[in-house]
Amino acid sequence: MNQTFPFEVTVDGDIFNINWNGISSSVSPKDVAHTSPDKAFVLATQLNSSAELIKNIEIVPHKRGFFKPNYTVVPPSPTPTTEDEVASSIISDANLAPRISAYLEEIVGRDFRLHTPPGTSTAFFLTTEKKSRTPSLLVNDGYGVNQVVYLLAKILHTASNTILIEEPEIHLHPTLLRSFTRQLCNIIRDEKKQLIFTTHSEQVIASLLTLVAEGRLTPDDVHVYFAEKPSRETRLRHQSVNKHGQLDGGLVSFVDAELPPGRAFDRCAGSGKLPGP
């Protein structure tokens, strides 16, 4: 990373000097007088496109949410995931909070807004429950709502194209989870985003498959991989989805996990005895 590798390349008869550090490149024409700088810019854009895609990946970790009533802007790190960094992105982007609010209303019936007292640089994060018209600090709202705001902030960030989410179902009850998944469908379509997530929730998978069955997603929009670890090696097995929202192989892992306690309960219920500890 502290070295560069110079070489020349000829494009349409023009020669360019390229310095590459293994990830990104700088490009300059060898004959400045006869070569348009625009050609060098186009070539540099093409060479650096992969690095730019990597820079536009957002990470949503397992630990997420806003645990303070107010925030001030802090400098972002190369991988901004802390609550202060994500809060700073909301405060700094005038369009992000209204966009979060629009999706949050569809998901949980609450809006989201910032309040900055006059003469200060401190922003309070507020939500309003629409039916009761009762505003409250986000930190005092349910943790499900809190987490959805964090998720939306990361997903809707203008610089992000691909978002990696670890277990979106955490702290979300089934109804909210289904509603959230349906709004993810709208975000994918309207915002041109790619979402990659891990999940242990059959509700998430079933909600996505329902969207395919309804025609809101196509089978090509959804790729499902079942992760299994028979020994020391983790293997990913692709499960295809058809136009009816049916998953090749089904939700076998979830069903198998539920069968033992379900059978034990049936045996106890049949005998009239309560299951022991």
Image (spheres, grey):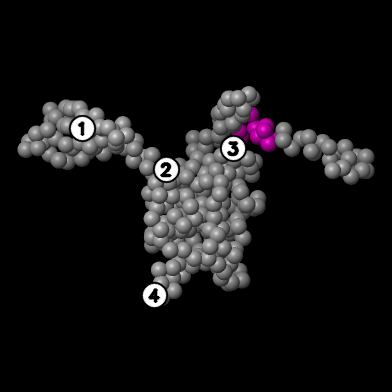
- Find the magenta span and give its range: 246-255
Of the 4 image quadrants, the one containing the C terminus is: top right
First reached walking from the N terminus: tag 1 or tag 2: 1
Helix, strand or loop for disc 2 = strand
Q: Is residue 42 above or below residue 135?
A: above
Residue receiving disc 1: 18
Q: Amino acid at mark 4?
A: Gly
Q: Residues within 10 Å of mark 2 (few under 14, many from 20)?
A: some
* Camera sees residue 136: yes
Q: Amino acid at mark 1?
A: Ile
Of the 4 image quadrants, the one containing the N terminus is: top left
The kind of secondary structure the magenta stretch mainly shows is loop
Q: Are marks 4 and 2 in contact (CB under 8 Å)?
A: no
> Separation of disc 3 and disc 2 at Cα?
28 Å
> Separation of disc 3 and disc 4 at Cα?
54 Å
Q: Amino acid at mark 2?
A: Ile
First reached walking from the N terminus: tag 3 or tag 1: 1
First reached walking from the N terminus: tag 3 or tag 2: 2
Specify the label residue 119 is tagged with.
Answer: 4
> Separation of disc 1 and disc 2 at Cα?
26 Å
262 or 86, nearer to the observer: 86
Please name the residue shown 48% across and 52% down the image.
82
Please name the residue shown 14% across and 40% down the image.
37
Residue receiving disc 2: 57
Which quadrant of the figure has residue 260? Answer: top right
Circle nearer the viewer, 3 or 1: 1
Residue receiving disc 3: 245
Describe residue 63's horizontal placement relative to residue 275 as left or right.
left
Circle nearer the viewer, 1 or 2: 1
